[in-house]
Image (cartoon, grey):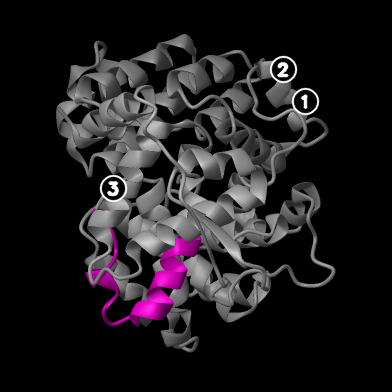
Amino acid sequence: MSNRIVLALAVAFIAAAGALTAVLVFQPDDGEGDSAAVARVVNPEQCERLGGGDARACYASAFGAMVRAERDPRPVVETIADLAWSQGGYLLANCHGVMHTVGRRYAKQAGVTLANLMNYLPQTNDPGCPAGFAHGLVTAVGPDIDVRNPREAAQVCSEAGTRYQRYSCTHGMGHAFMRIYSDQLRPALGLCRRLGEQAAPDCAQGAYHDYWFAVAGADDAQLPEGAETDPRRLCGDQPLGFVRPCWYRAFVDNRPEGAPVDSPEELDALCDGLGGLQRSACVTAGSVIGPPDPAAQLLICAGLSKPADAESCVRGTKVQNLLDYPTSAHVDLISRCAVFVGAPRAACLRWLGKTLAVLTDGKFARRGCPRLRSASARRLCLEGARTMEEALVTFS
């Protein structure tokens, strides 16, 4: 039985017994947020009741207190991740962003540097709490980066243990580059370009993620005066190679009216009036804020009338939510590409083959793709899996 299942049962038992009690501790802010005292709540249910930015600040303070004294924070971060998976709801959906703040503040007080960064980065493919903590750590080492040679700094990412962790580190570099330049996109993207064509789009996605944090007022990111906040205008003015990274997280921390997207009609309306690459990238971004079940996402994608929209929608499928599931569940998901016909079916098999390979650090190519029923499905799955080392562009 997994730790997450055990923890879920424990939480359920304690809740049923009425033993979950909140402990409120007020402490002065550490100088990185508001000057007012911050409520630190041990019971996460109390944080969730606050809602919005107050809930995020509450969780960040509580989780920050948990890791603050740890020489190696990774076991505690894993405990927090287990809690988020067992709680679900607001915490699971927002833990990544919350842990950005926790990681950044921890790095500052623990003296994390570019040289010792790998001693602190979580060794997991979990895209939620641990990845957020990792991105916060990388953001914090920005002052160590020589902007004259950003590729040298990014070489540390090659030391990560899995493909997902290397991607995550590169994404974090985008956040770090933004903080170096006070969340100014142009110079930060310039540093991303200098990482090379394989890393640049994933670094750029981190840079745009920090920009959308600033728009939302999250993680102490500061939006430059007069900066654009409408993704249609901002992403419409970006270099072609960065349009998809720009759009990908546009709705995650800045939900449009009517979110989440639960039907093909809602997704179509969200991107109404856009065409070409801009529409394609918008459809992917809308898919990202769709149902948490990737199988349900595929059904929405299959309901889109235009094949190009269906292909773009598949790029937002949250395969990451199947992280702890067996290979059989991964095979079941990619088998659902059968709901498409023609080009969207091929695109679905390639994309899920690629992302499931990333999720499993290549194992899916060996254990999953060969289990698909048709020869064409197996071939397309493997074609995707073989590209797992290439830029991911739309992934988290």
Using a 10 Å C-alpha cutoff, classify the residue at mark 2 as few (fewer than 14 neighbours), some (14 to 19) or many (20 or more).
Answer: few
- Residue identified by numbered label 2: 265
* Residue 199 appears in the figure: no
Q: Is residue 13 left or right of residue 248?
A: left
Hey, which quadrant is residue 282 in on the image?
top right
The segment highlighted magenta reads 100-123
Q: Name the foreground residue: 12 vs 332.
A: 12
Q: Which numbered mark, 1 or 3, is in the foreground of this view? A: 3
The Cα–Cα distance between marks 1 and 3, rounded to whole angstroms, is: 40 Å
Q: What amino acid does circle 2 point to?
A: Glu
Residue at 69%, 46% (x, y): give it: 254
Q: Name the foreground residue: 338 vs 208.
A: 208
Q: Which numbered mark, 3 or 2, is in the foreground of this view? A: 3
Q: Earlier in the sequence, mark 3 or mark 2?
A: 3
Q: What amino acid does circle 1 point to?
A: Ala
Q: What amino acid does circle 3 point to?
A: Thr
Question: Which label sits on residue 79?
Answer: 3
Residue at 58%, 23% (x, y): give it: 310
* Residue 261 appears in the figure: yes
